[in-house]
Image (cartoon, rainbow, N blue to C red):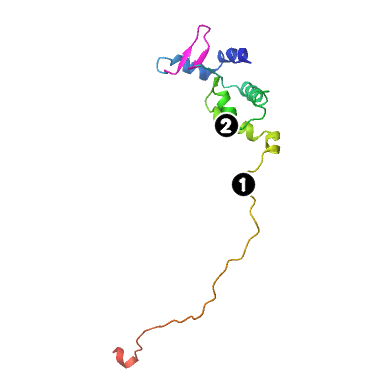
Amino acid sequence: LISRIKEAQKEDSEIWTIVENLDKQVEFRLDDDNVLWQDTRLVVPNDASLREALLTKAHSSLFSIHSSSTKMYHDLKQHFWWSGMKGDVAMFVSKCLICQQVTIEHQRASGLLQPLNIPVWRRNIHGFCYRVTTDSEEA
C-alpha cells in the first residue's frame, strides 16, 4: 500500500502544486526519492480507491478492529496526511455496518411521562377602574 501511495503521488496534480510551492510551505518536504511528506507523515494523493483501501486496512487491522472514528483518525495521522482526512475517517466509520450494529447508546432511557402537579386556583379576581362618560360630557 505504501508503494502504491508513492507511485500515485507522481500522477497527482494537487501534490505537484504543493511541490512547486515547497519554498512557501514549511511543513512539507521531498525526500531523496521525490516522495512528498508532511513533517514525518506520508502525503496520500487524491485517489478515492487508494484512500478507501487505506481506511479499510486501518479500520480492520488486528490491533484496532472497528475502532471509533476518533481513535482511527489519531492512529492514521501518525503516519499519513491528506486534506480532509478527519472528515473522511468520520464518514467511513459512520458507514460501517458492523460498527452501527454494535454501537451502544450511552444515554439512559427516558421514563414514562409524569403529569405536572398544578395548584388549584382559589380565587380569580379582576378589578377594572375606568370612567364612564355620557354624550353630554364629551362636548
Q: Residues within 10 Å of mark 2 (few under 14, many from 20)?
A: few
**Disc 2 designates what residue?**
70
Residue occupying the far bottom of the picture: 136
Residue ID at (60%, 32%): 69
Q: Residues within 10 Å of mark 1 (few under 14, many from 20)?
A: few
**Disc 1 designates what residue?**
107
Q: Quadrant of the N terminus?
A: top right
Residue occupying the far left of the picture: 139
The answer to if 28 sits in the magenta stretch is yes
Position of 87 with respect to 127 (left or right) is right
- Seen from the viewer's position, the closer of residues 120 and 86 is 120
Residue 26 place in picture, x, y as percent: 41, 17
Q: Quadrant of the C terminus?
A: bottom left
Residue 120 place in picture, x, y as percent: 54, 76
Residue 71 in the image: above or below residue 133: above
Q: Amino acid at mark 1?
A: Gln
- Seen from the viewer's position, the closer of residues 25 and 135 is 25
Residue 21 place in picture, x, y as percent: 43, 16
Residue 68 in the image: above or below residue 104: above
| Number of disc labels | 2
Residue 52 in the image: above or below residue 31: below
Residue 27 in the image: above or below residue 131: above
Position of 83 with respect to 103 (left or right) is left
- Seen from the viewer's position, the closer of residues 70 and 49 is 70
Tell me where the magenta segment starts and ends, as one range.
26-39
Residue 27 place in picture, x, y as percent: 44, 18
Residue ID at (66%, 34%): 95
Dot 2: element: helix
